[in-house]
Image (cartoon, rainbow, N blue to C red):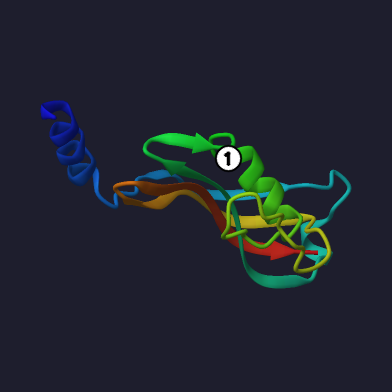
Amino acid sequence: MKYFILSLLAAQLTGCASANVAQKLSFVSFDEKANPDSLKSVGSIEGKDCTWYVWGYAIGMDPTVRNAFFNAANQKEDSLIPGQTATSKGAPLKVVKNISVEHGGFNAWLVSRSCMVVTGAGYR
């Protein structure tokens, strides 16, 4: 019982924290032949790779920056339910500028969600 209470206290102390991983990356190209000056802007984009946790055990693989970039480049919408497949919002991007990579999610003691989030300006 003592360890159960200690684990609940530890979970409560971790709370809803997020930490920045990288900011102000200026340019990433997904097409080596793309000329950034001739591309059309699609505005702000976001790509996420998330994993759900129950009692600290992951349902699936841990989130990665690579998968978050893949979802951003392919304009995949975030799936909210574990096991749900992401749907595409549009054609794949060729370039992303002004990139920020962050770690986010939430912790609700029994259930938590951890995400890698990539944001920036997308071009096709």
Considering every residue shown, the one lying at the far top of the view is 3
Does 94 sit left or right of 109 as displayed?
Answer: right
Q: Is residue 63 above or below residue 95?
A: above
In the picture, the quarter occupied by the C terminus is bottom right
Q: Quadrant of residue 95?
A: bottom right
Q: Residue 59, percent across and down?
A: 54, 39
Q: Residue 79, percent across and down?
A: 62, 58
Does 12 sit left or right of 109 as displayed?
Answer: left
Q: Which residue is mark 1?
A: 65
Residue found 71% across the figure and 54% down from its top: 85
Q: Quadrant of residue 2?
A: top left
Q: Element type at marker 1? A: helix
In this rendering, the count of numbered labels is: 1
Q: Could you classify mark 1 by the number of other residues whose Cα lies within 10 Å: few (under 14), some (14-19), or many (20 or more)?
A: some
Q: Mark 1 is on which residue type?
A: Val
Q: Residue 49, percent across and down?
A: 58, 47
Considering every residue shown, the one lying at the far left of the view is 2
Residue found 49% across the figure and 36% down from its top: 58
Q: Residue 8, percent across and down?
A: 19, 40
Q: Is residue 29 above or below residue 81?
A: above
Q: 121 and 13: which one is in front?
A: 13
Residue found 38% across the figure and 48% down from its top: 111
Does 50 sit left or right of 38 as displayed?
Answer: left
Considering every residue shown, the one lying at the far front of the view is 1
Q: Is residue 74 above or below residue 1?
A: below
